Amino acid sequence: MFEELNNRPADSLLALIKAFQADKRAGKIDLGVGVYRDAMGRTPVMRAVKAAEQFLLETQDSKKYLGPEGDLQFVRLLQPIIFGQSPAFGERLVGIQTPGGSGALRLGAELIQTAKPSAKVLLGTPSWPNHAPIFGSARLTVKEYPFVDLASQQVKFESVVAALSSANAGDVVLLHGCCHNPTGIDFTMEEWRRIAELLVAHKLVPFIDLAYQGLGDGLEQDAAPTRMILEAVDEALIAYSCDKNFGLYRERVGALYVMTRNAGDIGKAESNMAALARVNWSMPPDHGAAIVRTILESAEMSAMWRAELEEMCERVNGNRAALAAAAPDLAFISRQRGLFSNLSISRETAAALRASHGIYMADSGRMNLAGMQPADAGAIVTALQAEGCLK
């Protein structure tokens, strides 16, 4: 059987981690893997998470199975953070815990395949590299269209409008709720309003990937586009990740929410989500969701978490400001949000930046701005100038 397999290419980001670790140069800078790093270069466990884990250590009295729906109190407590207090569409929402945002995307893809296998998934490019494979593995047709011009660092909004206008009723549109990965370029609120109009006019279903809430302009501001879209449309899917804004990367904490046209359809959606979860992972892991639930159940821990998240957001935006100020050609970086920006460079240039300057970023030109320190801006600009990336 296994002799028939072909080798798959190694994950480029995992190779980047190994290359950075093997580099002995003192001035190397890691802009590669997309995790938050503090001023010491660490990815720390948040203080609120430590407090919640201590509470769980002292009070948790069982490790029995969860059901396939996971920790439903965790799912409920996230809702006001994502959707606001008592949203008009709240009675049409149902959620389920998933292994990270990736699990939410995969479960949503399986649900689409079950409900309407003919639906196409519209995906603006560039996007997170795993988006297209996840939907393709669920046997859905992915239709890509250009979303951003990296040379100008501008949204190609005419392309977005054209793609949505030519889609068929019932097709799905993948949207990054905030802090676009990999570009950091988000729609303006006016563009979001136009997208909402197109979704309604052409009867399209938004699938919002909200993986970085709180790391752009704050929890409320980062949720505003999602809430506006949901107020406009009849149906939607929302994949949510707690991996970044709670620093729970390895715990794989997420949720899938579905908004149905009628409150009476919630039961059908929920039963199908649970059935699909059962055959994918049976039951989600408990620990990460229990941490988030514990934090959100406690006013003191919640306040601690929110304060820490604001610190993280300010640090990332401070790094952006420092790099943008170091070179006029990089001014766009200060206008972008989230961990990432994406330079318009070749694979060969990315390799030269690593080999000659110790500047590690993905071959695509994606940079994790949380991986730098403000003092690194000069070295990064010097390297980019040496390789002809800047004037």
Image: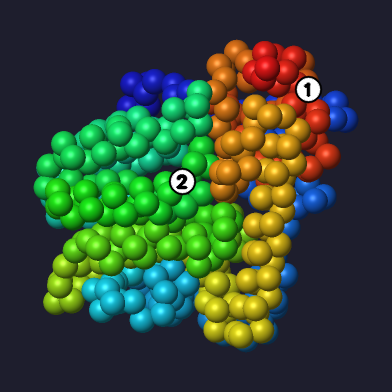
Residue type highlighted by circle 1: Thr
Category of crowding for the residue at label 2, using alpha-carbon neighbours closer than 10 angstroms: few (below 14), some (14–19), many (at least 20): many
Q: Is residue 234 above or below residue 191?
A: below
Task: Say the numbered circle drawn on residue 186.
Answer: 2
Where residue 31 appears, x then y in whole percent? 67, 35
Residue 152 position, x and y percent, is 50, 27
The structure residue drawn at horizontal position 22% and vertical position 61%, both measured from the top left corner, is 233
Q: What is the C-alpha distance between the residues marked 2 and 1? A: 28 Å
Badge 2 marks a residue whose secondary structure is loop
Q: Is residue 200 visible?
A: yes
How crowded pointer 1 is (Cα within 10 Å; few <14, some 14-19, many 20+) is rated as: some
**Whether residue 79 is situated above or below residue 205 in the rendered picture:** below
Residue 37, given in percent of the width and then of the height, sits at 71, 49
Residue 103 visible in the current orientation: no
Q: Which of 55 and 302 is in front in this view?
A: 302
Task: Tell me the kind of residue under disc 2.
Answer: Asp
Q: In which quarter of the image is the C terminus?
A: top right
Kindly identify which residue carries mark 1. Answer: 382
**Residue 309: x %, y % from top left:** 64, 64
